[in-house]
Image (cartoon, rainbow, N blue to C red):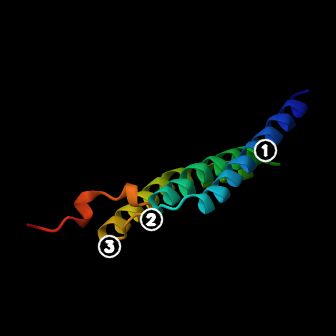
Amino acid sequence: MIEIIRDVVAGTLLLVGSAFALVAAVGMFRMRDVYARIHVVTKPATLSLVATLTAAALRAPSWGSAALLVLALVLQLWTVPAASHLLGRSIRRTGVSPAVPDAIDESWTAEES
């Protein structure tokens, strides 16, 4: 009975992970702003990874392989937000303006008077 429940939960998590991966892929083409693309790459893709690795850990053949999957998940959750923050910060510092004219911050283009 527990095997059936574990299979159903793992299958559901795989479907959820696939859905989030699809949302991230579609969002990359739909978003025009570089900052929105950073958001699309990090948030849904991370949720997809969480769901997929959790499903794989549930179906892992041993505790050791499940521990490695959990370690990979923890490292991803630790590094992806920092990397996206640094990417956004470097984009702002280099002066890349957003693609959407409404989203331009006036302090970026304002000349010193």
**Residue that protrudes farthest toward the bottom in the picture:** 94
**Quarter in which the C terminus is drawn:** bottom left
Disc 2 designates what residue? 99
**Quarter in which the N terminus is drawn:** top right
Q: Element type at marker 2?
A: loop
Q: Residue 75: in sight, yes or no?
A: no
Nearest the eye: 63 or 15: 15
Q: Element type at marker 3?
A: helix
Q: Is residue 100 above or below residue 6?
A: below
How many neighbours does mark 1 have within 10 angstroms: few (below 14), some (14-19), or many (20 or more)?
some
Q: Could you tell me the amino acid type at mark 1?
A: Leu
Residue 101 at what x, y percent from top left?
A: 39, 61
How many neighbours does mark 2 have within 10 angstroms: few (below 14), some (14-19), or many (20 or more)?
some
Going from N to C along the chain, the mark reached first, 2 or 1, is 1
Residue drawn at x 86%, y 38% is 7
Q: Element type at marker 1?
A: helix
Nearest the eye: 1 or 28: 28
Alpha-carbon distance for marks 2 and 3? 15 Å
Q: Nearer the viewer, mark 2 or mark 1?
A: 2
Disc 1 designates what residue? 15
Q: Nearer the viewer, mark 3 or mark 1?
A: 3
Q: Could you tell me the amino acid type at mark 3?
A: Thr
Residue drawn at x 89%, y 34% is 3
**Residue that protrudes farthest toward the left in the picture:** 113
Q: Is residue 10 left or right of residue 22?
A: right
Disc 3 designates what residue? 94
